[in-house]
Image: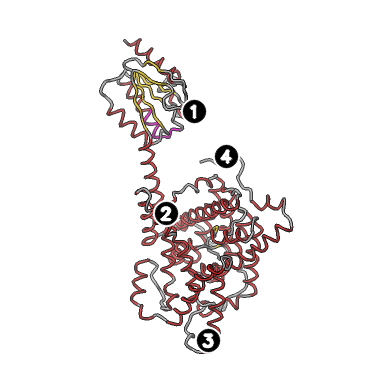
Amino acid sequence: MKLTGAIDFKPKIAKSLRTYNASRFRADAIAGIVVGIVALPLAIAFGIASGVSPTIGLITAIIGGFLVSALGGCSVQIGGPTGAFIVIVYNIIATYGLEGLAIATFMAGLILVLMGLFKLGTVIKFIPYPIVIGFTAGIAVTIFSTQMNDFFGLGLTGLPSEFLPKWGAYFQNIGNIDLPTLAIGVAALAIMIVTPKISKKLPGALIAIILTTLALWILGMVTDAFDGVATIGSRFGEMSTDIPAPHGFTLDMATINMLLPSAFTIAVLGAIESLLSATVADGVTGSRTNSNTELIGQGVANIVVPLFGGIPVTGAIARTMTNITNGGRTPVAGIIHAAVLLLIFLFLMPLINMIPMACLASVLIMVAYNMSGWRTIAHILKAPKSDISVLLVTFVLTVIFDLTIAIEIGLLLAVVLFLRRVMQNTEIKVYSEQLDVAEGTDSDNHEVLDVAKGVSIYEIDGPFFFGIATKFDELMRTNLSEKPIVRIIRMRKVSFIDATGLHNLEILVSSSEQEGIEVVLSGVHDNVRATLEHAGFDKLLPADRICDHITKAVAMANSIVASKK
């Protein structure tokens, strides 16, 4: 992994503004206003569910959304707080406090910037799909479980953060359900379910918030039965409409070591979600996201946002798709979305204080349902058992234990299964007496070489990395029916060789020399030859024994056999 060549940082807004015009601005303005309205309840709900105030949720959406659009590599990406971060943010706050969250988010931003600088944007896209689905579904279940207290009006405080103890507390207090609160929650949920059936362009969450808030205000004047329904104002008090001044935090090695796993989880999760959102957007719009620029833009947003007390930021698929369907095609729409949220923050906060907490719980329940991807899970359950096992392990670890552990174990399991598949699909062929040069290729020139008795040819079909190196070593040890005079290692299909493969090859040459067996390499690619030379392999094997074609290697081997006989 090297930082070579020019830095791949080309924000899409620079290219978009070169050909910008009034008609494009009108389309972006409409999309930005709609997305801003849609993002409002989500920003508030995600902030509260993450363990911070609704003000922090809005500030995150404003600052983070602006920076993601201004510096990102996707034309239509909408950034802000998302449901994926709720679990990890809540746990960090519970363990390390708000300053710990700020430090972890800041460190995650630095990691994302480094990912972009080292051009890892394309690599992140290849994280196995079962892992993404597994922890997304796990996050959905966890979000759902965190909303039961407000949805049913149980009034519980000090709830355990762990999944099973939390549900134990719910069942122990099932008799404390507040029916007026539950009625508000059910009504909001019903509105969000019905609204898309009327029109898919209507923001169901916003309509649910407006109608339930209005209903609660009217009912409050008619009867005192709904006085106990919690609202944002009753839970958090009157919220300030001032943007917090930027503030720093103390960094030392002990803090960095303590929060690095959480920062890594935020960075990986943010990278996956933002690039997944960008990939979906590209498929709809036909545009092409610069993945490395997108990671740098996301990183800068996560570096700046915690300075204002915000929570982690990433690309949001639902808001991005809302932007696209309403005509947004440049980052200007995302910037307008941030401006709309800023105006709401400055002038409408007194109205936001009246929103029922049960309604926000319903919004998050719908978010959890949409995140769950149960149809996708049902489809993956028909896939190979290895994919199912990765999905289930990641899901269970996310729900029962911790998202950090889930991502680490899920990635490790996926890597192990990938290596197993590669080893199963990589062949090591053994030839003697005759060899067809064109075998395994599309060539019609079938030149058959006569191989002298005493010459064994081993062909490695694939990269010579540590898993295959071990397999090759085992084959060499078991194939000892007759001691050869010359061993030809055919490497035409070896695209690269790692340290373990190089080490095994060195051992093979040394042990063969001790046994009086000559070794000849054939079809060595230039990059593999360079690796061998850099490692000093020429001290073990003369340069003339490293041939560029099998014809030369067989001729040399036959000559060696003839001279020894």
Q: Which numbered disc flags the more N-terminal residue, 4 or 1?
A: 4
Residue 504 included in the magenta stretch of the image: yes
Residue 174 shown left or right of residue 180 in the figure: left
Residue at image mark 2: 407
Towards the viewer: 156 or 203 = 203
Chain-order first, disc 2 or disc 1: 2
Give residue 430's position: percent from left, percent from top. 34, 25
**How far apart are the alpha carbons under marks 2 and 3?**
46 Å
What secondary structure is found at the residue carrying circle 4? Answer: loop
Mark found first going from the N terminus, 3 or 4 = 4
Q: CA distance from mark 3 to mark 4?
A: 65 Å
Circles 2, 3 touching at the beta carbon (< 8 Å): no
Q: Between label 3 and label 4, give the one nearer the viewer.
A: 3
Q: Residue at x 38, y 70 (%)?
A: 160
Image quarter hosting the C terminus:
top left
The mark lying in front, picked from 3 and 1, is 3
The number of numbered discs placed on residues in the rendered structure image is 4
Residue 85 drawn at (x, y percent)? 48, 61
Q: CA distance from mark 3 to mark 1?
A: 79 Å
User: Which residue of the protein is positioned furthest toward the front in this rendering?
Assistant: 198
First-in-chain label (4 vs 2): 4
Left or right of 314 on screen, residue 408: left
Give the residue type at disc 3: Gly
Residue 154: % across, % down = 41, 78
Q: Please report the bounds of the magenta region as a residue range.
A: 496-505
Residue that carries the numbered disc 3 in the rendered image: 220
| Residue 83 point in image, percent of width and height | 49, 63
Q: Which residue is mark 1?
A: 530
Contact (Cβ within 8 Å) of mark 3 with mark 1: no
Residue at mark 4 to residue at mark 1: CA–CA distance = 19 Å
